[in-house]
């Protein structure tokens, strides 16, 4: 290192980090930006008297199924020329003497060698294997485990049953008041059962969370961020990820962009992110979805664990350490940990205020309860911490499901894995206008419906895989959410009934009409009451202050949810894989160090 011109204090600093992290001096020098990679490897090339390549032409790299191992370990790459074969070598400093001796003993060996950098090897491999990798990211789940894929919206049997059910309902609605009453009772009881599951989260059981583990010998942690048309938040994202309290030499951050999204790619490059960052360009192809992009990048994930973030996310700096500590003390079947998502702009509008209540109830009350019960968890779309081995075993993400998070949570459960939670939050911005909110929520409902249809292709097999209790919880969580959203316009009918009863008198006690009216009123009040109560219990004082009295818009918010649900129903048959992009903008810096 001294011969390369690196100062003694710099080497000493890298040596201390190497001892602490279980790496090498060379790794720490490069990962922390203490030396420039091109200059460093060019100097090693001069020491070996070999040519240096700062970039590799991918047309000289042959693709095969083993090529992606070079993304994980970019130590050597074969280059095919017309009349000869060369090898691009990434040497290690500790092996320089051995290499020099080998080249001296075999003079012809050096003639077939060039020196390059790890980033040059990865860049060439990304391009050389792009077509194959793209096909695999789109088709692997469907071809290997078709029963888990949403590529086919409705199976033949499901289509037949759906058509039969619609015809039967239409016939019953026009021919028998009794049939409608029975249906009304059934829907109301199911609605109430779904509410009772959420009501159980009102009294959370406190648990002592493990302290973060010491910094030594941490595993490699991969961070995946799928971006599309996110040039405006590129600086905020790089800054947020740079604050993660994890050794750079053990951090593998991949910013996954569509190759034709030039504005975002250039904005990210302009930020000059550190060596732990890598920009991955996904060739444009349908479906243009976040899970397809994540699948494409997963081939190069070097970490034992992986976390998913969105472009606008600002995770707590200690979130990786908290997740690692939780994994260390959890049972071996815990494959995923969900961090809470916290809305930072709850005071921007009444929509963002109610959205903040909704997120507080879901991520800080309902999901921790489900984790304690070891029940199926519909994951959030970001801040999922996963064991990479389990993720690959279950087939990774479904590129055809537009809520890949909920689908993955359910599939993990079916395959015997479980999910947990951590308390270090990720801060996000809620949609502030109706149109942005509606497009986002329509996509969510469409994906939840896809997930329910995929899960219900073989109900008896699903019961066998999940167990009776978890199967019922799944129905009440996903099915109950869909049904309650679709049927909420009945509120208008309930208001009309109430008005008529006030004018004409209420039905006599003990009658079926009176009982059904009371049941509907209880469901309506419980819907709004639980929504508000769970959110308020979970929120910190500052969050409650930002929301203020805007929670009074909850009834209108529920009607908006119903509009989005019905919009998703009509969109699913014609645009099942359409991903309606949610626009993001930079937001003021806030303190993200506070835990929940």
Image (cartoon, helix red, strand yellow):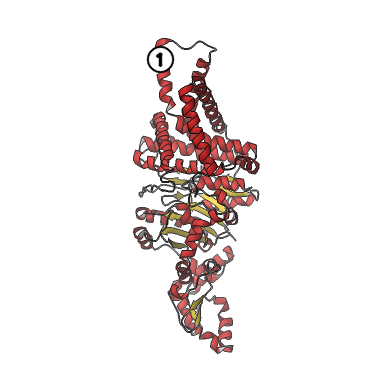
Drawn side of residue 68 relative to residue 547, left or right: right
Could you say which is closer to the camera, residue 369 or residue 288? 288
- Quickly name the residue at label 1: 500
- Look at the numbered disc 1 and give the secondary structure of its residue: helix
Residue 439 sits in quarter: top left
Rendered view: 11 above or below 350: below
Residue 148 pos. (x, y %) = 56, 49
Residue 101 pos. (x, y %) = 58, 85
Could you say which is closer to the camera, residue 508 or residue 367? 508
Q: Residue at x 63, y 36 (%)?
A: 469
Could you say which is closer to the camera, residue 464 or residue 73? 464
The number of numbered badges drawn on the structure is 1
Rendered view: 265 above or below 510: below
**Callout 1: 10 Å neighbours few (<14), some, many (20+)?**
few
Could you say which is closer to the camera, residue 495 or residue 273? 495
Rendered view: 319 above or below 505: below
Residue 553 pos. (x, y %) = 39, 30
Residue 223 pos. (x, y %) = 50, 56
Q: Residue at x 56, y 43 (%)?
A: 455
Drawn side of residue 479 relative to residue 460, left or right: left
Residue 305 sits in quarter: bottom right
Q: Residue at x 56, y 69 (%)?
A: 24
Q: Is residue 529 visible?
A: no
Residue 435 sits in quarter: top left
Q: Is residue 373 visible?
A: yes
């Amino acid at each position: 290192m001294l011969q390369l011109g690196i100062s003694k204090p710099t080497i000493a600093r890298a040596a201390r980090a190497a001892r602490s992290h279980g790496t090498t001096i060379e790794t720490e020098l490069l990962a922390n930006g203490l030396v420039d990679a091109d200059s460093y490897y060019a100097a090693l090339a001069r020491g070996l008297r070999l040519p240096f390549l700062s970039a590799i032409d991918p047309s000289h790299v042959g693709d095969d199924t083993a090529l992606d191992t070079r993304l994980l370990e970019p130590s050597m790459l074969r280059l095919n020329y017309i009349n000869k074969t060369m090898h691009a070598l990434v040497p290690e400093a500790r092996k320089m003497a051995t290499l020099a001796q080998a080249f001296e003993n075999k003079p012809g060996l050096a003639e077939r060698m060039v020196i390059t950098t790890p980033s040059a090897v990865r860049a060439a491999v990304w391009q050389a294997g792009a077509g194959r990798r793209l096909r695999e990211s789109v088709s692997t789940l469907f071809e290997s485990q078709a029963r888990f894929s949403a590529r086919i919206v409705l199976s033949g049997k499901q289509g037949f049953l759906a058509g039969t059910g619609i015809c039967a309902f239409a016939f019953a609605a026009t021919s028998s008041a009794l049939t409608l009453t029975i249906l009304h009772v059934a829907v109301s009881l199911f609605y109430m059962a779904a509410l009772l599951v959420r009501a159980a989260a009102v009294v959370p059981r406190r648990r002592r969370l493990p302290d973060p583990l010491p910094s030594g010998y941490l595993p490699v942690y991969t961070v995946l961020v799928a971006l599309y048309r996110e040039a405006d938040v590129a600086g905020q994202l790089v800054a947020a990820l740079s604050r993660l309290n994890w050794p750079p030499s053990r951090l593998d951050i991949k910013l996954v962009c569509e190759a034709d999204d030039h504005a975002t790619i250039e904005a990210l490059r302009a930020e000059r992110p550190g060596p732990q960052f890598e920009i991955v360009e996904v060739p444009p192809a349908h479906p243009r979805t976040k899970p397809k992009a994540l699948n494409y990048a997963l081939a190069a994930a070097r970490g034992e664990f992986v976390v998913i973030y969105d472009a606008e996310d600002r995770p707590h700096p200690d979130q990786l350490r908290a997740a690692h500590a939780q994994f260390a003390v959890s049972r071996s079947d815990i494959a995923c940990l969900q961090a809470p998502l916290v809305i930072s702009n709850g005071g921007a509008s009444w929509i963002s205020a109610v959205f903040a209540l909704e997120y507080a109830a879901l991520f800080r009350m309902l999901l921790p309860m489900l984790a304690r019960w070891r029940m199926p968890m519909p994951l959030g779309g970001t801040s999922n911490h996963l064991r990479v081995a389990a993720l690959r075993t279950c087939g990774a993400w479904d590129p055809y499901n537009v809520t890949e998070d909920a689908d993955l949570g359910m599939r993990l459960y079916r395959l015997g894995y479980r999910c947990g939670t951590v308390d270090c939050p990720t801060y996000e911005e809620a949609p502030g206008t109706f149109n942005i909110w509606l497009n986002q929520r329509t996509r969510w409902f469409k994906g939840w419906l896809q997930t329910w249809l995929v899960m219900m292709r073989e109900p008896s097999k699903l019961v066998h895989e999940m167990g009776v209790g978890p199967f019922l919880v799944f129905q009440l969580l996903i099915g109950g959410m869909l049904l309650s959203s679709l049927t909420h316009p009945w509120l208008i009918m309930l208001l009309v009934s109430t008005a008529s009863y006030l004018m004409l008198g209420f039905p006599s006690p003990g009658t079926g009409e009176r009982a059904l009216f009371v049941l509907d009123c209880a469901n309506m009040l419980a819907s709004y009451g639980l929504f508000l109560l769970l959110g308020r219990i979970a929120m910190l004082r500052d969050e409650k202050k930002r929301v203020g009295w805007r929670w009074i818009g909850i009834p209108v918010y529920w009607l908006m949810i119903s509009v989005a649900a019905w919009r998703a129903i009509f969109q699913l048959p014609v645009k099942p894989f359409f991903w309606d992009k949610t626009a993001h903008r930079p937001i003021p810096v806030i303190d993200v160090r506070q835990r929940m």
